[in-house]
Amino acid sequence: MEKKIIATTSLAGCFGCHMSVLDIDERILELIELVEFNKSPVDDIKTFTKPVDIGIIEGGCCNSENVEVLRSFRKNCKILISLGECAIMGGLPALRNGIPIEECLNEAYINGPTVGLNTQHILPNDDELPMLLDKVYPCHEIVKIDYYLPGCPPSAELIWDALVALITGSKLDLPYEVIKFD
Amino acid sequence: MTNKIKIKIDGKEIITDQGKTIVEAAHENGIFIPTLCNFAGALPKGCCRMCTIKINNRFMTSCTTPAAHGMEVENNTNEINDFRKGIIELLFVSGNHFCPSCEKSGNCELQALAYRYQMMVPRFPYDFPMKSVDGSSPYIIKDQNRCILCKRCIKTIKDDLGRHYFAFKERGHKLEVLLDEKMGKEISSALAKKAMENCPVGSIIFKEVGFEVPIGQRKYDHKPIGSEIEN
Ligand code: SF4
Ligand code: SF4
Ligand code: FES
């Protein structure tokens, strides 16, 4: 069987979902028999170098760069998976949703109790910095997502079972205990 | 003397007492019908629609409909289950449910129903409404982000004179269930604990202790909601 090509990325996430991928432990040896990684923090390949079969997205979209990366994943991957609560519903970064962005920035950089060193009251404004979005968006509200694997982080079992089912084309049976939102 | 009657649920004949609701009859006979606003011992109000079933091809709420002899009820069908899943999804998108940081996670009925009906993602867009949190009571945090307006706290948490600690405020999409400011300050620790227990979700949090039961030992960690009823 030809190896499937996988790409992964972390948008507005904490890398916990990527850690959970590593939690498949020694099965990672089986995994590399089945797949080849392309753009991903796992192998540090920065740009897509070939068409990808399965793209795995951790984190929602909180800024313009996240949107750009997510769209490039949609363009380059046949199948996209939202992995984890942040990709699926914004997660903890989305706690700011509903609060005006100016208020968030002022609290983080000017009024917060731990910002004493910012004596000139500067808000980050370098051109290199991506623009914050008005709120944090779940990935499927930006591009089409094909599958969702919930959890914070999703369990290694869920990730493993789902990946094997997708790669080998077998039926996915999800035991009750693997679907969790926490 | 109670009158015994026969009804059919998904073709299975069960015997129950006249005067029982369909939910009561089903649960007594080991058939699960999901509920949220219904609470044993309090008058049913039929406000969440989770317990929807079909009789004569009409959607009805089984917590408010009395069983009648010869009734044929549709319960566990794809159509009805998808309808129920839709309600769960609506509740998730219309509040702010950040399960990973919620103290009720693992013991929450809404979350447990989402697991049972395998909600991977709601089909509706997230609303992310601005909601308030009231921590003025010494024993209770009332978090509006997670309130599903089921009225269980209103119906069951009262003082010796029968006065309610919780009440509705506003209407329509502004509707909220508030803890009375004055009574909230005077509520006993025991009653506050009971309020948290009676709330199906994490909208009423008892202060003092938190995350007491570790992950893996919580109510719905291993068995789906309803499995305690089904035989
Ligand atoms: S109340 Fe239930 S569904 Fe809502 S955040 Fe808490 S655990 Fe999740
Ligand atoms: S606080 Fe809890 S019990 Fe009261 S209405 Fe809201 S969800 Fe129901
Ligand atoms: S349980 Fe019947 S309507 Fe809520």
Image: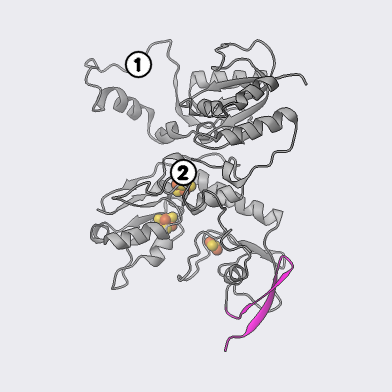
Disc 1 packing (10 Å; few <14; some 14–19; many ≥20): few
Q: Vertically, is B102 above or below A25?
A: below
Q: What SS does tag 1 mark? A: loop
Disc 2 packing (10 Å; few <14; some 14–19; many ≥20): many
Q: Residue at x 50, y 32 (%)?
A: A86
User: Can residue B203 be seen?
Assistant: yes
Q: Quadrant of residue B119?
A: top right
* Label 1 CB-ligand 1 distance < 8 A: no
Q: Position of residue A136 (x, y in %)?
A: 47, 30
Q: Nearer the viewer, residue B149 or B186?
A: B186
Residue labelled with disc 1: A124
Asked if residue B151 lies left or right of residue B81, the reply is left
Q: Main secondary structure of the magenta part?
A: strand
Quadrant position of the C terminus of chain B in the picture: bottom right
| Nearer mark to the viewer, of 2 and 1 | 2
Residue extending furthest toward the front: A26
Residue labelled with disc 2: B97
Residue extending furthest toward the right: A1
Q: Give the residue type at disc 2.
A: His
Q: Nearer the viewer, residue B43 or A166?
A: A166
Q: Residue at x 53, y 25 (%)?
A: A18
User: Can residue B168 be seen?
Assistant: no
* Label 2 CB-ligand 1 distance < 8 A: yes
Asked if residue B106 lies left or right of residue A30, the reply is left
Residues shaded magenta: B1-19
Q: Position of residue A112 (x, y in %)?
A: 26, 27
CB atoms at circles 2 and 1 under 8 Å apart? no
- Are discs 2 and 1 both within one chain? no
Q: Is residue B10 magenta?
A: yes
Gap in angstroms between the C-alphas marked 2 and 1: 30 Å
Chain holding disc 2: B
